[in-house]
Amino acid sequence: MNVSFPIPQELESYVQGQIQSGSYDTVADYFLALLNQDRKRREAQEKLASLLQEGLDSEAELATSAYWQDLRLSVLGEKH
């Protein structure tokens, strides 16, 4: 697929600066990297939304100080 679209001069200069700095080899590489970052961001947002919903749908547990201590120990890999 070939894509062509006009961009403002200041953004064109920015993209050219990214290429000249060696961050990207071509304009196409720069835009492909942006598209890939956007896809990954959206996937991460969808995963977060799914995990949040899973948490909301799960059975509630009373968050006592003992609960937090046990959670802290399990996250840090420590034993009681």
Image: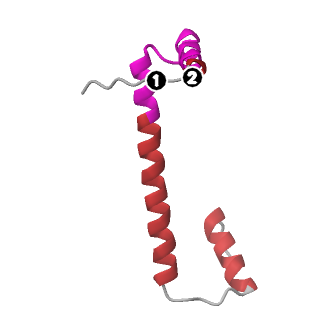
Classify residue 46 by image quadrant: bottom left
Say which amino acid is labelled 2.
Leu
Which quadrant does the C terminus fall into? bottom right
Residue 18 located left or right of residue 25 = right
Is residue 28 a member of the stretch shown in magenta? yes
What residue appears at the point 62 percent right and 66 percent down from the top-left corner? 75
Magenta residue span = 12-34
Is residue 51 a member of the stretch shown in magenta? no
Which quadrant does the N terminus fall into? top left
Principal secondary structure, stretch drawn in magenta? helix
Query: Compared to 63, does 37 lie above or below?
Result: above
Residue 62 showing in the rendered view: yes
Q: Do the residues under discs 2 and 1 have CB atoms within 8 angstroms?
A: no
Mark nearer the N terminus (2 vs 1) = 2
Classify residue 76 by image quadrant: bottom right
Give x and y (percent) for residue 70: 66, 78
Say which amino acid is labelled 1.
Tyr
Query: Compared to 69, does 11 lie above or below?
Result: above
**Number of residues whose C-alpha sits closer than 10 Å to that of mark 2, classed few (under 14), some (14–19) or many (20 or more):** few
Count of marks overlaid on the render: 2
What residue appears at the point 61 percent right and 70 percent down from the top-left corner? 74
Identify the disc placed on residue 30.
Answer: 1
Identify the disc placed on residue 11.
Answer: 2
What residue appears at the point 44 percent right and 45 percent down from the top-left corner? 40
